[in-house]
Structures are given as structure tokens and as C-alpha cells.
Amino acid sequence: MVKRWAALFVCACLLVIAVSSKATIFDQDASGADADILRQLAPSLLQNGVDTVLGSALKFGISGRPRLAPLKGYHAEKRNWDEILPSSWALGFQQGMFGALVAFKSSKLMDKKADCDLAGNIDVDACAFVNGWLNADPNSRIFIAFTKMDLAVAAKVKKALEQNGYTVFMFLKAGQSTPWADESLVGEVFTQAAHRFVLDTANSRGSVGVALESKLCEFLLTPPPPLSRWAKLIKGGA
């Protein structure tokens, strides 16, 4: 009898674990290239405390756990973020309103070489990024937007991407962690990324996200920033 109850207990625990694991992937019937990438990343994201939405994040109420979801159709109020111009995202970055994770899988054949000046140490990381981006499989290029309040979550997603073989750069204006990542480079990366995602959190859906969305929409009639040296390199080599 004791063995039977023990066996039932073990089965119940396994069932709870299975249901719990499954529940971390939302909108599982979604299809497409973005959904395929997110399925691949889901186990590593789960290990780092981040859930995954394969389709529309807005189908589900916000929870205490952050989620990585497609940018397509996402909004905090009215305007879908994937429909906002790259130049608006660039200017929003310039004002420090959001950060971005930029990821890619490097090609084994480095057949493109940017004309980088490595005389100054500050340019070494920038040149590594440009060369990596130019030589990456275009379908592996990922852009992930996150609010400035979600930096700690972004660090977890960065770790999950790296566990899956991606080279990841975190673009931040505040703190100048990547001083070479200027607004025009962010706009160009946004344009070229095959997959655009967003960190779906209480911040991105709440007042922080509403303010970001509103500001990005204000930039629609603003001329795009001039292309910087690094933006020109990836624009010309893409």
C-alpha cells in the first residue's frame, strides 16, 4: 500500500512538473519563423526564469514572470510597435527610453570584412560587432527591445541566447555600456533584423511602455538621424 501511494505521489509530481513546463510556452499553436526561433530558445529561457510566447503576447494577461514574445502586433496602448519606423526606434534609443539586445550566429566563413580602424580600443568591440553582423546568417539576426526598467531581465535573455550559440550585444544609452552603439546603428540593425522580439513585462505594458509608445509615435514626422560610421558599414555591407 505504501509503495502504491509512493508511486502515485511520484506520478503526480511528474505531472505537475510537465504541466508547469508546458505552461511556460504560450500560444503554442502559433507558426512562422519567429515561433520556430522561440521554440528553440524556450528551454534556455525557462532555465533563466523567462517564459515564451510563440504568437501574440496580448492574448494573455500579464504575470509575475517576464516573457519573450514577437514584436509583431505588440502594443502598450494603440500603436503596434512593429509598425513604428526604424528611425523612430533610433531616436527613442538616443533619448535612453529603451535598450536592445542584438544577436546573431556567426558564419564559419568570414567573407566580408569591414574597413575598421582599430587604432583606438573603443572601436574594437564595434568592429567585432560589425564584422560579425555582416558575416552572420541573415536569418539568425535578432533584435529584442526592452524598457529601461527591465535591464535585469534582458541580462537573463542574453544568457539564454548565448547558451544557444548566439553572439549577443546589449545596446544601452544609459551608462554608456556600448558608447559606439549610436541611434543610427540601432535603426539600421532594427531594419535588417530577421526576427524582432520584445520583453513582455508589467513595465512594457504599463506606464513605461505607454510612454515609450507615445514618444516613438511623436518621432514619426522627425527626420531620421544621419548615418554614423558604423551604421554606414552594416548598411553598405548587408
Image (spheres, helix red, strand yellow):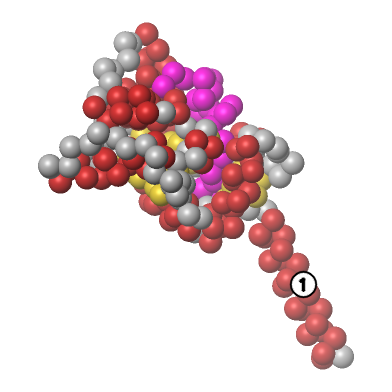
Looking at the rendered image, the quarter that the C terminus falls into is top left
Q: Residue 79: where, in percent of width, then height?
A: 52, 20
- Majority SS type along the magenta span: loop
Residue 99: quadrant of the picture? top left
Residue 146 position in % (x across, y down): 42, 38
**Pointer 1: what residue?**
12
Quadrant in the picture for the N terminus: bottom right
Q: Is residue 212 magenta?
A: no
Extreme residue in the left direction: 119
Identify the residue at horizontal 51%, vertical 20% (top origin). 83
Secondary element type, mark 1 = helix
Looking at the rendered structure, the kind of residue marked 1 is Ala
Task: Check the image and report above or below for 177 versus 20.
Answer: above
92, 203: nearer the viewer: 92
Q: Quadrant of residue 210?
A: top left
User: Which x, y percent locates residue 162?
Assistant: 44, 55
Most extreme residue toward the bottom, as rendered?
2
Residue drawn at x 66%, y 45% is: 26
Determine crowd level at label 1: few under 14, some 14-19, many 20+ residues with C-alpha closer than 10 A. Answer: few
Which span is picked out in magenta?
65-86
Q: For the point 56% across and 40% down, which residue is it?
A: 69
Q: Along the horizontal axis of the image, is 63 left or right of 228?
A: right
Query: Viewer-proximal residue, 160 or 120?
Result: 120
Q: Position of residue 117 (x, y in %)?
A: 18, 37
How many numbered marks have been drawn onto this rendered protein structure? 1
Decide if residue 31 is on the left or right side of residue 188: right
Residue 11 visible in the picture: yes
